[in-house]
Each structure stands twice: as C-alpha cells, then as structure tokens.
C-alpha cells in the first residue's frame, strides 16, 4: 500500500498573507512542516500541494517535492482530489501547511494497516480533551463514534450531552485526515450535505452521505497552527525552547 502525505500550502491568507514562506530559524514555515512529515514511519512519500508559484519556487529551491494545484479549490479535500489525479497512491493523508510543529506520530495515527479500495473510505485523528474550556470552544470540533470507532457525528457544540452520567470523555478532531481515491472522488463530485451546511465542518459531508469515516486516537493534541504573526512569534519561541532553531 502506497501512502502519500500531502502538505496543503496556500499563499493567500486573510490574517497572515504569505505565511507559508514566513521565516522560522532561516527556513520557511512550509519547510518545517514538510521535514517533520518526512519523519512519519508510515508515509511512503511527502509532497507539497500549493496554488502559488512563489511557494512552488521556494520548495524546488530547497529540494522539496511540490505539485501545483488550482487556486479555485474551495477546500483542502478539493485540493487533495487534484493531487490524486497527478500522483497515484492508495491512501492520501492531509497535513496542514501552517503547523510547523506537527508531530509525526499524529500523522501515523491516521494511517491504518489496510485501506479498502472498493468503497469510499477515510480516517480522522482524534484525541481526548483534557481542559473543560476546550470542550465549550466552538473552534474545537467534538466527535462521537460507535464501538468500532466509526464516525457518528461531529459538532462545534459539546457532544454528547451529559444527561445520564458525567463518566465519559470528550474527544476532538485533531486535524490529520486520510482518504482513499474513491473518497476524494466522492467529495469532488458531491454537494455539501445538511449538517455540513449547519455546522460549517467540511468533514461532515462524509457522515451526511453515509460514507465510512473511521476515527483513530492519538495522544498528540492538535499542534499550534500559525494563523497570525503573533502565532508565528509563539511558534518561534517554542522551537527555541525545544532547541530546534
């Protein structure tokens, strides 16, 4: 089974334009994401998917594999579909290009031993939530699943509701997702479903249409994403503390 890690990296950003090329210890942010992804034990290869020639040029100059995709893609899954038409693989793993501290273990957690190819199939990494404040934060997507860890629902609201007992853990979406080609084709050729429109969560489309989405637990919390220049300052400070730069 060939597994491909895809670092989704855009230049345009409302709050931080050009953040993919922001300097961190002498290297652009996308370089850090790419090289942390290369440390995954389950990925066979890693490629940067971008829609901007400036990112493409930097990737090539620094020896990173890169493919150009359309700037018309509405979501990362749309971009992943485009990559799947360029590079053949059995499983495609989405890696956010604005998480320079991504843990390779979180990437490995999204990759099962076997991936069915005859049906639409996807995975999503999740982790237990430790802080009650995180549970009520709508930016943290809460998840519920059946006894086989198959996705039942995802919400910005705390779910399940603790009516009968408080003896349970809340789980949240971590942000590393995997798809086979059939799942990407389905997403590309479908319209947003009912709950996707309500919650504003792209991944809900698979649940809306009854596709198989399995959750895999990791003890790695969602890594710090760089959405603003202040986030970048925080990342640089943490990387200095870890002696990465």
Image (cartoon, grey):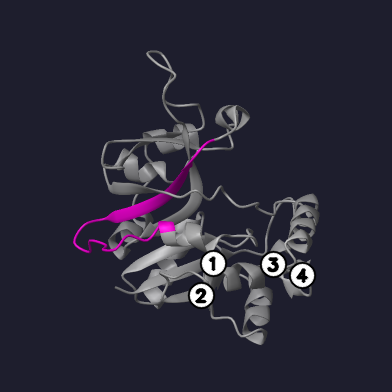
Closer to the observer: label 2 or label 4? 4
Which mark, residue 29?
A: 3
Relative horizontal placement of residue 123, taking residue 12 as reference (left or right):
left
- Residue at the spot of label 2: 47
Q: Nearer the viewer, residue 213 or 223?
A: 223
Compare marks 4 and 1 and give the one earlier in the sequence: 1
Disc tally is: 4
Compare marks 4 and 3 and give the one earlier in the sequence: 3
Compare marks 2 and 1 and give the one earlier in the sequence: 1
SS type, badge 3: helix
| C-alpha span from label 2 to label 1 | 6 Å
Relative horizontal placement of residue 28, taking residue 109 as reference (left or right):
right
Q: Residue at x 77, y 59 (%)?
A: 241
Residue 2 forms part of the magenta stretch: no
Closer to the observer: label 4 or label 1? 4
The reply to whether callout 2 and callout 4 are in contact (CB within 8 Å) is no
Q: In this view, does 78 lie above or below 151?
A: below
Q: Nearer the viewer, residue 23 or 171?
A: 171
- Residue at the spot of label 1: 7
Residue 124 forms part of the magenta stretch: yes
| Residue 134 at x, y percent in the picture | 60, 33
The reply to whether callout 2 and callout 1 are in contact (CB within 8 Å) is yes
SS type, badge 1: strand
Compare marks 1 and 3 and give the one earlier in the sequence: 1
Q: Which range is magenta?
A: 109-129
- Residue at the spot of label 4: 245
- Density class for disc 2 (Cα within 10 Å; few <14, some 14-19, many ≥20) is many
- Density class for disc 4 (Cα within 10 Å; few <14, some 14-19, many ≥20) is few
């Amino acid at each position: 089974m060939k597994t491909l890690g895809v670092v989704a990296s855009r230049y345009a950003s409302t709050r931080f334009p050009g953040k993919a090329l922001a300097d961190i210890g002498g290297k652009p942010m996308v370089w850090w994401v790419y090289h942390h992804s290369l440390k995954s034990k389950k990925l066979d290869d890693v490629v940067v998917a971008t829609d901007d020639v400036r990112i493409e040029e930097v990737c090539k100059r620094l020896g990173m594999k890169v493919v150009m995709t359309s700037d018309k893609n509405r979501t990362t899954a749309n971009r992943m579909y485009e990559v799947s038409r360029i590079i053949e693989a059995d499983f495609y793993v989405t890696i956010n290009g604005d998480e320079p501290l991504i843990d390779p273990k979180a990437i490995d957690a999204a990759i099962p031993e076997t991936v069915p190819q005859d049906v639409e199939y996807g995975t999503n990494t999740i982790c237990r939530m430790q802080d009650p404040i995180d549970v009520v934060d709508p930016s943290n997507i809460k998840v519920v699943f059946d006894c086989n860890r198959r996705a039942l629902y995802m919400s910005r609201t705390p779910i399940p509701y603790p009516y009968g007992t408080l003896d349970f853990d809340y789980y949240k979406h971590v942000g590393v997702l995997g798809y086979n080609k059939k799942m990407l084709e389905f997403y590309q050729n479908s319209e947003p479903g009912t709950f996707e429109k309500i919650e504003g969560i792209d991944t809900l489309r698979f649940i809306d249409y009854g596709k198989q989405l399995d959750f895999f637990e990791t003890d790695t919390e969602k890594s710090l994403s760089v959405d603003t220049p202040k986030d970048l300052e925080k990342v640089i400070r943490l990387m200095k503390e870890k002696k990465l730069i």
